[in-house]
Amino acid sequence: MVRRQQHGRMDGVMVAVGAVGCLGFGAVACASGGAVTGGAPAGDPVRVLHRAADALVAAGSSKATTSLEMATGGTRVTIRGEGVYDYRKRLGRLRVLLPQDPAGAAARRPITELLAPGALFMKNRGAGVPADKWVRVDTGTLSDGNLVTGGATDPFAAAEVLRGTRSARFVGRTEVAGTGVRHYRGTADLGKAARAASEANRGPLGAAASGFATARVPFDAYLDDRGRIRKVRHRFSFVNGRQDVPVEVASTTLLYDFGTPADVRLPEGGDIYAGRIAAE
């Protein structure tokens, strides 16, 4: 199967499902105040979660680790990533580790991903792409809005999903990596999230609302006392086009070291591969 990239777009590419196709799939005090007194914080949980992405913008940048777990037909794989993200420029860089293949061969070389408004750039993509070239994907054309495609959910997109929160409750106080946080559990709607999102994420989240098996996204979010997301776990469900049974995906994003430098430079036009992309 060969996939074609034209004018900087790669139709239907899915690293998490397509590039890992050999695995059997075929193919991210609250910002508004709200004192914490040891119990539930002041403020409606839905409104608190609607503002979580704004708290990240106020923080500027952070380090991030991601985990994408996919399960279908009794098979489960996990793809992990780590890097940095600039929430004001909407730019990020992740090093994504793909799992071993079913034959037990050594894990593939890490894929370097650059996240930008409207685009995903991948290096070490494989599938006939020269090692020194980048593949560019227009995230506005992806049926999952790049919540799954790259094998990692864009950290800011993960936060903006919470803008679509329809119901939520405060679970309690706990810790994430030694930091005191407030745990919320609820359900977001991708269509509502798209309408409330920043301009760069409206298109991708809108595509996900239409492309997933359901626009309803259950989540667990952990916010520190400044309202910043420290951990968020979403559960997505989509049909990959080759199977009638939806693929269940659990995406977990951890954010830490806020304010860390996040210098992300996008590739020049001559460094972007425009040839044919073969599915692996």
Image (cartoon, grey):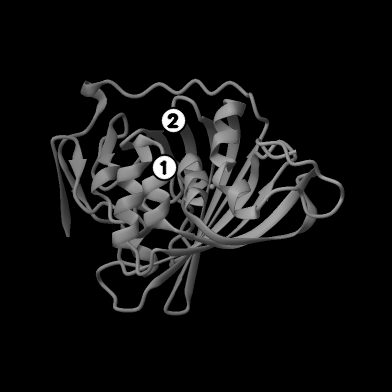
Q: Residues within 10 Å of mark 2 (few under 14, many from 20)?
A: many
Drawn side of residue 139 relative to residue 278, left or right: right
* SS label for mark 2: loop
Residue in the image at 32% along x and 24% along y: 267
Nearest the eye: 202 or 73: 202
Marked residue nearer the N-terminal end (2 or 1)? 2
In this rendering, position of residue 128 left or right of residue 158: left
Secondary element under disc 1, as helix, strand or loop, is loop
Mark pair 2, 1: CA separation: 13 Å
Which residue is at a point 34% across and 43% down the rendered structure image?
202
Task: Name the image quarter holding residue 136.
Answer: top left
Residue 258 vs residue 219: left or right?
Answer: right
Dot 2 amino acid type: Arg
Q: Is residue 77 above or below residue 157?
A: below
Local crowd at mark 1 within 10 Å, few (<14), some, or many (≥20)?
A: many
Q: Position of residue 124 (x, y in %)?
A: 36, 39
In-front residue for pair 71/86: 86
Residue to which mark 2 is pinned: 90
Q: Quadrant of residue 209?
A: bottom left
